Image (cartoon, rainbow, N blue to C red):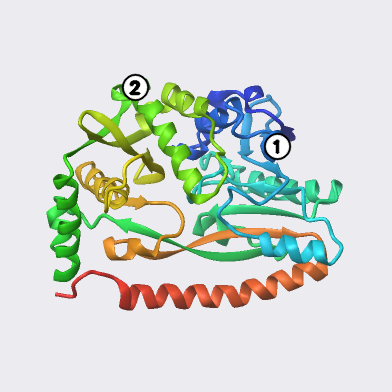
Amino acid sequence: MKCELVSSLANVNRNEWDSLNTSNHPFTSYDFLNSLEISESVSAKTGWSPQHIIIKNNKGSIIGASPNYLKMHSYGEYIFDHAWANAFENAGGQYYPKLLSAIPFTPATGPRILIDPKNPDNHKIFELIINMFEVIVQNNNLSSAHINFITDNFSKKLNNEKWIKRKGLQFHWHNKDYTSFDDFLSKLKSSKRKAIRKERRTILNNNLIIQKVTGNELNSEMWDSFYNFYLNTIDKKWGGAYLTKSFFYLINKTMKNKILLIIARQDNKIVAGALNFIGGDTLYGRNWGSIVNIPFLHFELCYYQAIEYAIDNNIKIVEAGAQGHHKIQRGYVAETIYSSHLIQNESFAKAVRNFVQIESKQIDRQIELINQQGLPYSNI
């Protein structure tokens, strides 16, 4: 086997990369990651320098891969280590650059090491890629390596004491074989059911027409409008507009059948939209925005319409992104998310490990309390 670091996916064979993305996950697809690079949403200028790990066999074919970046900051990750960086630098260290395996600007669990499970050497390939993380950190005197939003199975497979396992919290909706949105509502407590119906009536009272658009139905009017919504949302939250306009046009060109754009029209004008990506059994909510101030419009586009689409298309899970305790009252449950961290400095690694142990107990307790006491489902 041969290990390579690749600074551009343009130098990687698309079919070989996607052949390893056996779960057909939209965010680890070649088209999604390459669109980020081509659009310059991801680049050295934005603090994301691609350093993808590629493993080849003796015939030169790719048999393993991992999307990786040299990071000059901790923005756009959603696994927060700003406090770690501040502590390390206050002690005289240099936290950045760091190595990160993640999907830029995308808080969604998925594969971070791509291997064909049918390959008889898949375990060796996995260990080789993990070893590559460690070698890169050591040889380049980096502070750390991080693998974010990993699966539970990945977390268990990474049985290496050097890596610090960390827990986090997200809210996901699960399809219990509902036959319709009303069927889903019927499983909620009466007060919650009435509240959601009241919120949805507000949309009707504001003369809004909601459309779920995918594939060839997507057009430039929708993308131009949505990009303006995206910028408007960023301005309100005082954040940075990571994604360029060309990124949205690129994903429309290369993966439009994996995109669900939910738009709201008022007087035939597009006034709001929510961008989702369609996985094998999961619908991933990503960005949203609006140019009108209508109560509950965010809930309608990002949650209720996504749930309706999942029910109609037999999709089992809806992941609506990071944060948001308001999701609980709309049928989402609290679930554990995972990440793993390699800290080169032994003293600092010990401090981080102690912090994570305390944090994990708090996460476990919070999830237990939410799912036992806070959920809107009826026990009847």
| Image disc number at residue 210 | none
Say what secondary structure mark 1 lies in.
Answer: strand
Query: Which of the pair 238/164 is nearer the observer?
Result: 238
Residue 69 appears in view: yes
Q: Nearer the viewer, mark 1 or mark 2?
A: 2
Q: Quadrant of the C terminus?
A: bottom left
Q: Residue 245: x, y in percent? A: 50, 28
Q: Residue 58: x, y in percent? A: 71, 28
Q: Residue 356: x, y in percent? A: 63, 71
Disc 1: CA contacts within 10 A as few (<14), some (14-19) or many (>=20) = many
Residue bearing mark 1: 49
Q: Is residue 115 above or below residue 344?
A: above
Q: Is residue 253 above or below residue 169?
A: above
Disc 2: CA contacts within 10 A as few (<14), some (14-19) or many (>=20) = few
User: Residue 200 vs residue 242: left or right?
Assistant: left
Query: Which of the pair 179/23 is nearer the observer?
Result: 179
Say what secondary structure mark 2 lies in.
Answer: loop
User: Residue 50 vs residue 302: left or right?
Assistant: right
The tag earlier along the polypeptide, 1 or 2, is: 1
Residue bearing mark 2: 219
Q: Is residue 36 above or below residue 74?
A: above
Residue beneath the point at 27% across and 62% down: 331
Residue beneath the point at 18% across and 51% down: 202
User: Residue 213 vs residue 112: left or right?
Assistant: left
The residue type indicated by label 2 comes to Asn
Query: Which of the pair 213/318 is nearer the observer?
Result: 213
User: Residue 210 vs residue 250: left or right?
Assistant: left
Residue beneath the point at 62% across and 42% down: 121
The residue type indicated by label 1 comes to Ser
